[in-house]
Amino acid sequence: MLSQLLVNSTSPLILISGIGILLLVISNRITHVIDRIRELTLKTDKEDGTTTQILRAEIQIMMKRARTLRTSMVSLCASILSSTLLLVFSVLEAFNEGVYHFEGSALLVVSILGIAIAAACLLRDAIYSLHALQLDLQQINLEESS
């Protein structure tokens, strides 16, 4: 029974650990986005004309990034919650010999979906980041030509 308990609880524990690392990465990314929004807001106050429009467009992109990263964090937190419940059901299943098989499978699917949503959000964040970089380069070209 102890060996079955260890076998059943290993996968959810590894899953929770991996998701935690991914949450740390996303947390760092969202902190960077927030800092960048503050920096751009200060720049907007000092500039006018075309530069201000570019800065405002970049702020809008950064806000989209922040919302996307928030969605990613929420889906990962749901994944951690379902993995934790999966761990509980795995322990119960070890004592009751397969009674919670369906519930455990459903929780595993929810956990994997949370990770998939987070990965899609990270890809979207990278695309937004490239758009913001494009605007940044456009602003640099404007400053060099004036």
Image (cartoon, grey):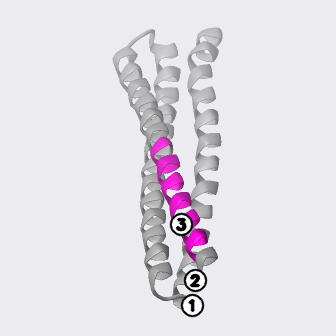
Q: Amino acid at mark 1?
A: Lys
Q: Position of residue 60 (x, y in %)?
A: 42, 68
Q: Amino acid at mark 3?
A: Gln
- Identify the mark at residue 46; answer none if there is no mark: 1
How busy is the neighbourhood of tag 1: few (under 14 within 10 Å), some, or many (20 plus)?
few
Q: Nearer the viewer, residue 67 or 79?
A: 67
Residue found 47% across the figure and 60% down from its top = 66
Q: CA distance from mark 2 to mark 1?
A: 5 Å
Q: Amino acid at mark 2?
A: Lys
Residue found 58% across the figure and 63% down from its top = 137
Q: Nearer the viewer, residue 82 or 123?
A: 123
Marker count (numbered): 3
How busy is the neighbourhood of tag 3: few (under 14 within 10 Å), some, or many (20 plus)?
few
Q: Is residue 128 magenta?
A: yes
Residue found 39% across the figure and 25% down from its top = 109
> Which mark sits nearer the N-terminus, 1 or 3?
1
- Identify the mark at residue 43; answer none if there is no mark: 2
